[in-house]
Amino acid sequence: MHRVCVYCGSNFGNDPAFREAAAAVGHEMAVQGLGLVYGGGSVGLMGTVADAVLEGGGEVIGVIPRKLVELEKEHRGLTKLLETDTMHERKRLMMEHADGFLVLPGGYGTLEELFEVIAWLQLGFHHKPVGLLNVDGFYDLMLAQLDHMTAKGLLKAEHRAMLLVATEVKELLAAMQAFEPVDAGKWL
């Protein structure tokens, strides 16, 4: 794993632990020599992660739709900023440039990105690790829902286990580095 795509909020939220975790993720990625791929914004948790990687001397690739550039939300100090016409193109480029995916707290967009990359892993469209940093229990209810889906037979246990979860960034990155995809067969 050389580059990690981080999905997270474009806001800070109201728990200081979210911003601290975003900074810790960026710092640890830089220490481990991992480049960052992310949404290209300068605001919220995403800006915090990017700034921390840059402060540590790491590579940061931002991918942002032109519509957001027009709103002056792009980060102007990145290693590389790629502009796209659509959100679909943005997500495709982020996926192509990353060797793994790490999710921090966020809103609708973050959840949409998480579920897309984990579903694509389940279907075998990629074989990259997907990790969730459960900061201050932020994702506890969602994880309980995934367990409920498994108990009800709508999500295989092998597929549920594909989502790597930790509360500490070093632990999560280590699990992502050690990840071996399992071909559990979606419909068998």
Image: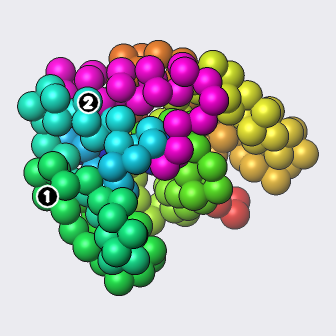
Tell me if residue 144 comes above or below residue 154 in the rendering. above
Can residue 146 be seen in the rendering of this structure? yes
- How packed is label 1: few (under 14 Cα within 10 Å), some, or many (20 or more)? some
Which quadrant is the C terminus positioned in?
A: bottom right
Tell me if residue 33 comes above or below residue 65 in the rendering. above
Q: Which residues are magenta?
A: 9-32
Q: Nearer the viewer, residue 32 or 157?
A: 32
Rounded to the nearest angstrom, the CA distance separating label 2 from label 1 is: 16 Å
Quadrant location of residue 81? bottom left
Can residue 162 be seen in the rendering of this structure? no
Q: Earlier in the sequence, mark 2 or mark 1?
A: 2
**Residue that label 2 marks:** 52
* Disc number for residue 80: 1
Q: Nearer the viewer, residue 114 or 45?
A: 45
Q: Position of residue 86 (x, y in %)?
A: 41, 80
Residues at circles 2 and 1 in contact by the CB criterion of under 8 Å: no
Q: Position of residue 98 (x, y in %)?
A: 28, 52
Q: What residue appears at the point 41 percent right and 30 percent down from the top-left corner?
A: 22
Q: What residue appears at the point 49 percent right and 49 percent down from the top-left corner?
A: 10
Residue 50 placement, left or right of 86: left
